[in-house]
Image (tube, grey):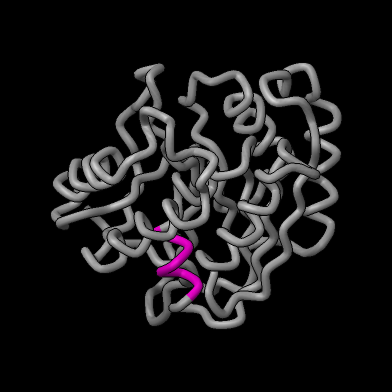
Amino acid sequence: MLSLLPERLDRMVLLGAHCDDIAVGAGGALLELSRAHPGVHVTALVLTGGGSLREEEERAALAAFCPGAKLEVIVHDLPDGRLPLRVERITQAMEEVRGLGEPDLVLGPSPHDLRPDHRAVARIVPTVFRDHLALGYELLKWEGDLAQPTAFLPLAEPVLREKIAKLHEHYGSQRDRTWFDAETFAGLARVRGVQCHARYAEAFHTGKIVLGVAPLTGVDPID
């Protein structure tokens, strides 16, 4: 297992179909990356929930999950459960976000997610962010669509506890959901931790990575 670190992290783009998707799927990563890169530019695009309590929750939550970051949150009001019918509008919204600056990292839904809204967003990511490092976060729901991830970010236990506490603090509207509890979040993090020789971890899916190789010096060229 090889650890690969980005050359820089000046700008991140976060993509979510619904309010809470980003924090549930990548809240630990946001805490770790924001603290490791103070002042990082973070633009979050959420496609549904605009003008509702969900938007208020999302803005407060992402501010808490991105400490010290230069954060911009954009929440649209597309209809929940109908995103596959809004491909053109989603693409336009992503292109507008990309126009704000080229990100070093894009976090969005996993392409393996079976929920139609999540899958619709995930399918558009590689068409807009073709030359970017894009990672798909996991959302554990009843669909049973978890696939084996390809990238892991180990989380120290205090960071996981902080993530869980912030989720419960900021997403009161979700507390009655069967999947929204500490055991669910910690359980998945423990499984992913085992898979990367850590106690806890968040895991991600990535499609294509281009490896750069430094020019060789002091070596005669091949005839």
Query: Up-down: is 12 above or below 122?
Result: below
Question: For the point 80% across and 36% down, which residue is it?
Answer: 77
- Depth check: give the residue in front, 98 or 167: 167
Query: Is residue 29 part of the magenta span, yes or no?
Result: yes
* In this rendering, position of residue 68 left or right of residue 1: right
The answer to which of 29 and 196 lies nearer the viewer is 29
Q: Is residue 5 magenta?
A: no
Residue at the location (48% across, 25% down)?
A: 113
Residue ID at (28%, 61%)? 161
209 shown above or below 18? below
Q: Is residue 92 left or right of residue 183?
A: right
- Residue 1 spot, x, y in % from top left: 21, 53
User: Left or right of 158: which side holds 12?
Assistant: right
Residue 28, quarter of picture: bottom left
Place of residue 182 in the rendered image (x, y in percent of width and height, measured from the top left): 28, 46
Residue 88 position within the rendered picture, expressed as x and y whole percent measured from the top left: 85, 27
- Is residue 131 or residue 39 the one in the foreground? 39
Asked which quadrant contains residue 122, the reply is: top right
Using the image, determine if residue 88 lies above or below residue 186. Answer: above
Secondary structure, magenta segment, majority class: helix
Q: Residue at 21% of width from left, 64% of height from top?
A: 157
* Residue 62, position as x, y percentages in the image: 58, 60
Report the magenta residues as a range: 28-34
The C terminus - image quarter: bottom left
